Image (cartoon, helix red, strand yellow):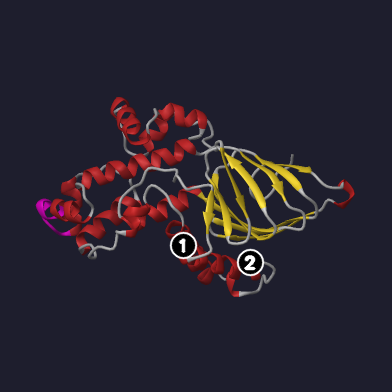
Amino acid sequence: MFDWAYCPLTVRPRGPVDAFSFDLTVIQLGPLTVGDLAYGVDVSTGLGYLDAYQLNLPLVGHVQARQHGTETAAGPGWATLFRPTGAVDQPLISGGSHQLATKIDASALEAALAQLLGHPIRGPLRIPLGNDFRTGPGRSLVRLLRFIHAELENRDGLVCQPLVASRLWSCVLTGVLLATDHQYRAELAGSVTPSRPRHVKRAIDLMEADPGRAVTVQDLARTVGVSVRALQEGFRRYAGMSPMTYLRRLRLARAHDDLRRPDTNGRTVTEIAHRWGFVHMGRFAAAYQAQYGELPHHTLRTGGG
């Protein structure tokens, strides 16, 4: 076993050991780690506990993969997408294969979806292990990833320029959300609604900038320059909930992200809850369980797995 750019990895050659080779070229684009991965002989691999989504697209060759008891086969045009909720087995990766492996920061993908939908979400996303990218948005996503792949070794190219890189990785996040099936896919497809009024957008921006800050609906209305009634009606119409419900869901989502992180450095549930504006632990635990189906201390102990 060894650590690499993605997660702990165990490789078992299934062909001649003296012919074994492992090649990897990687580039970091914001919340994405994009690499070209190749093996010289047939291998089986085990990936340690994932803390991110990982999209593997075979460019040459084929792969068998398994996660959470589900199995799939992938090849050119067919991709695997691993969830950040457990280990992965790949019983067979064919020799001479090339995979475009894209590690996606879980909080970044989930935040991108929440922004597109206009409300906090409950992650992780339940994306199928196998994905057909031969048509539609998936085919476009493959082309975008192939462009990034072609630029992996061009360290002076546009892909490495921050102004271009930020737009590229943002497009990849949106592309993954539109090209795969998940529990928010139907809502995302129907989320084209009239633009939010300026005062609703400003209030959302204020809350998302500092969710843990103590604030009332009166504070928000005064800051954005409208009446409490106008703000509440705007949120009801354009967000489907009250301003304080939106803030509570946002705080729960941020607390959930913290509780799932492996680098909590000994922080307790109470410390994390207080960080995001929860002062009554019983109410926090009840709201968290209603939203995520488990108590906060269980998420902290298992990392959401």
Counting from the top left corner in percent of width and height, residue 162 is at 54, 68
Q: Inspect the magenta stretch and tell me whether residue 229 lies in it.
A: yes
> Who's the residue at 67% across and 70% down the image?
155
Q: Which residues make up the magenta segment? A: 225-231
Please state which amino acid type lies under the numbered disc 1. Answer: Gly
Please state which amino acid type lies under the numbered disc 2. Answer: His
Q: Quadrant of residue 295?
A: top left
Q: Is residue 138 left or right of residue 210?
A: right
Instruction: Tell which circle, 1 or 2, labels the residue nearer the N-terminal end.
Output: 2
Q: Does 30 sit above or below residue 110?
A: below
Query: Quick one: label 2, few (<14), some, or many (20+) residues within 10 Å?
Result: many
> Who's the residue at 70% across and 68% down the image?
153
Q: Which mark is residue 117?
A: none
The answer to whether the residue labelled 1 contacts the one labelled 2, judged by CB atoms less than 8 Å apart, is no
Furthest toward the top, the residue is 282
Q: Which mark is residue 175?
A: 1
Camera-side residue of 273 and 179? 179
Q: Which mark is residue 149?
A: 2
